[in-house]
Image (cartoon, coloured by chain):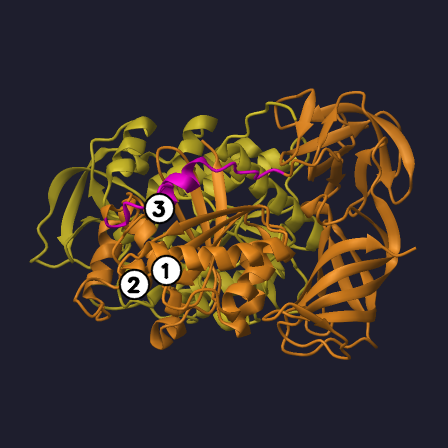
Amino acid sequence: MNILKFFTAGSVDDGKSTLIGRLLYDTDSILADQLEALQSSNRKNDDGTIDLAILTDGLRAEREQGITIDVAYKYFQTDKRKFIIADTPGHIQYTRNMVTGASTANLAIILVDARNGVVEQTIRHSYLVSLLGIKHVVVCINKMDMVDYSESVYTTIIDKYKILAQQLKLKDVTYIPVSALKGDNIVQLSERMAWYEGESLLHFLEKVDTDNLDKSQLARMPVQWVIRPQTKALHDYRGYAGRVLSGTFKLNDKVTVLPSGASSTVEKIEFFDQSPEIAHAGQSVILHLKDDVDISRGDTIVNASALPQESKLIEADLCWMDGRALDTSIMYLIQHNSKTTKCKISEILHKVDINTLEKHQAEEFKLNDIGRVIIKTADALAFDLYDDNRANGSAILIDSRTNLTVGALMFRAAVE
Amino acid sequence: MSTYNFDYLDELEAEAIHILREVAGQFEKPALLFSGGKDSITLVRLAEKAFRPGKFPFPLVHIDTGHNFQETIDYRDKMVERIGERLIVGSVQESIDQGKVVEQKGKNASRNALQTVTLLDTIAKYEFDACIGGARRDEEKARAKERIFSVRDEFGQWDPKRQRPELWNIYNGKIHKGENVRVFPISNWTELDVWNYIRRENIELPSIYFSHERDVITRNGQLMAASPFLNMDDEDLVFKKQVRFRTVGDMSCTAAVESEATLIDDIISEISASKISERGARLDDKVSEAAMEDRKKGGYF
């Protein structure tokens, strides 16, 4: 059994929380006492049934205002798979929360209200999915019960979406007509839409390729911690602890340590009481190298035959996440895997109007703005392009005045 | 691409080890909050996998309410001896004796709320800048929104509206002096995941997790262990029951469930079929719908 991480984009009006509530409810993932709390709560649907949206609206302010502000993580499993849902708010003022939820997801569910079709918000959510490089997209045409389960309404909407998908280069898109409120095509195929020939949402989620691990062949392991017991028995022991971001490391592989550029060979791979011959992407291991090279936290061990880019000047997409606007005159910190160094945003190339996808010149970068920048770092970073290797192509910006995470960066090119 | 099978427990484990090593790398004085419960016992195993053959880069810290099950304390001491790591105990009794907190009165009195003061005092005394805890997002709906690195101000308060965005697998542990970070490496695990992991790793647990006969009373519809720590009167009828505990908390606020489960396998099938969530057996969450959110804002684990 493996894990599928997905996120849902859509506003309250699209019935996003209802959809998630429905998935949890229909897969029997709501426990008795939670259900009891739910039933005793005084929020009900018009027809008196329980409002399933309450299941995901965790914080008091959200319950009071009836909106989803933050990212809520929900868990459920079937006999085929475990699921982690990042439930994110859909309004434009919560773009940063959506980017956060999307950053760890492998699949996105985009909700479209059957009555309204593809609207500004659909474009925005789809753009974010393409920006964050999410592999699979499921477009749920929701509220089919409000349009008499009409096939022609459905077809008109997906024809329009297909144009958008092409424009955004979304490769793997699946369309499902649903009613989250009534449960149509969520877990069971609905008899009310006999014309629909695809699978139910849950059935699709159970079998889609998970791709949890980056399929990139580029062997990368940022060193998080150096293990040196310095006891009598383990006097010369020196192990480099980290998580393999991508690719594999095998015994006797030639490796390069960056930024020093030192070369060595993998002598031993350790995992607690085991000494495997291969360390795979996703595993947290300890590597031992043949040569006595100087390695500390923040360095990256990579396969010598497939080196990453190294640069102090990087072109990147930036999503701004702080209430205080970007200041191009001050220094920020950039955290890229285990390495943190100072940086400046040296140039704003353009900003994207995420409702229309138009690019335009910009002087300032405010909360939820997204666009292309050039970033200048104090130390060179050893990175891959985001589209080639998500894990080694992303970084965050930290404002050292507040210590807040103020930006998300996706590397697009090294600047010559 | 190799045909390597990365099971969900392997993935959760690797993520947790990565988080523990980030704590080691980013903080000066971290600590692991150890309650003697299955979640913190799981954290200890994960720390062994993250740092052996080296020592843990942090001590274990136990906030002892003085109302613990004796089985938990025995387990704790035995485990600390086995792993050879440092244990710091913060005592709620001491906080009471020093007049920093006042014991609750009445039938539902519990020291659970008092722990927060002792916890914050212990953090201040040892200047811990990061405290690793075993909370999981599936436990409760406020926890479902908490970050893996959760920043607390110098009063220990969690502000759900000012949480830092947490992107990819990058954890921002930068803080100002006086603040600290609560770190939850098993955020993405469910109760069942923890049990399956304990079974897979063959981890020993305190005996109260397994079925045993015990003197109990009924309180607010739940079975409570009869003990000197529970305020009882003549109306409380003590009787014997075959029970076990699903969480390890204070004797005064942790309810027992009727159970015949004597093996981990029994427990796993019991939970799989169960219709009461784990925190449902904790009276401390029942006060209001926002009970956990309020306690977390106040500095609770």
Q: Amino acid at mark 1?
A: Val
Q: Which residues are magenta?
A: A192-213
Q: Position of residue B279 (x, y in %)?
A: 31, 52
* Residue A147, label in figure: 2
Secondary structure category for the residue under label 1? helix
Question: Can the viewer see residue B181?
Answer: no
Secondary structure category for the residue under label 3? loop
Query: Disc 1 sits on a residue from what chain?
Result: A
Image colour for chain A is orange
Disc number lying in front (1 or 3): 1
Instruction: Identify residue for label 3.
Output: B248
The image quadrant where one finds the N terminus of chain B is top right
User: Looking at the image, which is closer to me, B103 or B161?
Assistant: B161
Image colour for chain B is yellow
Say whether residue B103 is left or right of residue A407: left
Give the Cα separation between the discs numbered 2 and 3: 52 Å
User: Looking at the image, which is closer to me, B90 or A173?
Assistant: A173
Q: Position of residue B178 (x, y in %)?
A: 63, 69
